[in-house]
Amino acid sequence: MCRFLLYKSTSPILLADLLTRPAHSIIMQSVINKLRIDMTMPMNGDGFGIGWYDDQPGTAGCLFTSTLPAWSNMNLQRLAEKVRSRMVFAHVRATTGGTATSEANCHPWQFGSLMWMHNGNIGGFEKIKRRIQNSLSEEIFLSIKGTTDSEHSFAVFLNMLDDPHKPVFTYQELRTAMLKTIAQFNEWLDGEEQLSLMNFAVTDGQSVVCARYVTSAHLEAASLFYSSGSEFQADGGKYRMVKANKREDVVVVASEPLTYERTDWLAIPTNTLLVITPKLNVHLHPIKDKNWNPNRGRPKLN
């Protein structure tokens, strides 16, 4: 099970204030992850990736990926101390399904202005891999460079868009494509006993859509939390989400909270989409399919 985080704000943040400095930063989560479902692989040391956007809407973001563990990559440390952005994706990887440790298999992935990452797995992926590939347009099929279920999931998502080359998408377009992607996997996986954990995240640099999803009406999905406020900053050496007014100027989504301030973080309910609009409004949309269960429990912070 991987770990990821994303950040969207009206003001750019230094990557170090997300990736390396907070008490439970994503670099720390690559070594210690308290809310992991599969504890047989307690570390996320099979590579990492970060993606960020500049201030020009409709342009592709920048990616930096490596097969080295995030905690030992000096180039990541150097970049984090210099790069600032209003829109950041970050991911630390633990392989699933026996896939190779290679840069082609490191998240996030890009297609045009879109960026994608995944925490989880597609149960029975090898059984449906041919059907996935056969469903794709020639261009999207040829865009797949790695071997993971996660990159194939991105390809399915791209195939659900009317025009994946658009420089900017409405959040409604991204939300609809995400719902179609999950529905398509449910159709392909009908009768499959292995669980699928589909914590997906996608952005065009302006809007963000995240899914916290499991193919079960009773079990919990992989953990996913969010925090919003006016500024994510260090307060007396400790990071927290500052809420100076009622406006949402910052939204952070993470597999595990970056800080130990419990009141700063809310769990995204299982089988729910979180949408961040270009104006930083946060919407939660339950995915009311066969796996929807309003009485399911929610994860708690330890």
Image (cartoon, grey):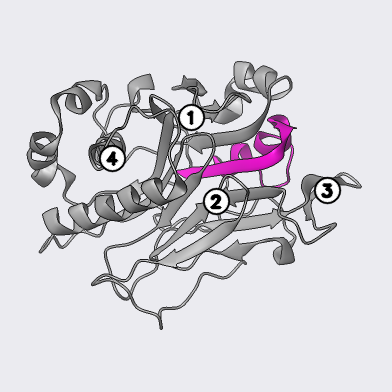
Q: Which of marks 1 and 4 is in front?
A: 4
The stretch of residues the image draws in magenta is 1-30
Q: How far apart are marks 4 and 3 (CA)?
A: 42 Å
Q: Which of marks 1 and 4 is nearer the N terminus?
A: 1
Q: Is residue 7 magenta?
A: yes
Q: Does the magenta stretch include residue 137?
A: no
**Of the numbered discs in the image, which one, if any, rests on residue 48?**
1
Q: Are marks 2 and 1 in contact (CB under 8 Å)?
A: no
Q: Are marks 1 and 3 in contact (CB under 8 Å)?
A: no
Q: Which of marks 2 and 1 is nearer the N terminus?
A: 1
Q: Which of marks 4 and 3 is nearer the N terminus?
A: 4
From the viewer's side, name the closer residue of 42 and 159. 159
Name the amino acid type tagged 1.
Phe
Residue 188, relative to residue 191: is it above or below? above
Q: How far apart are marks 1 and 3 (CA)?
A: 25 Å
Residue 287, relative to residue 155: is it above or below? below
Residue 7 in the image: state x and y as whole percent.
Answer: 61, 42
**Of the numbered discs in the image, which one, if any, rests on residue 93?**
none
Residue 8 in the image: state x and y as whole percent.
Answer: 62, 42
> Which residue is disc 4 drawn over?
161
Name the amino acid type tagged 4.
Leu
Which residue extends farthest bottom?
295
Near mark 1 (Cα within 10 A), the count class, few <14, some 14-19 or many ≥20, is many
**Tag 2 secondary structure:** strand
Name the amino acid type tagged 2.
Ile
Q: Earlier in the sequence, mark 1 or mark 3?
A: 1
**Tag 3 secondary structure:** strand
Name the amino acid type tagged 3.
Lys
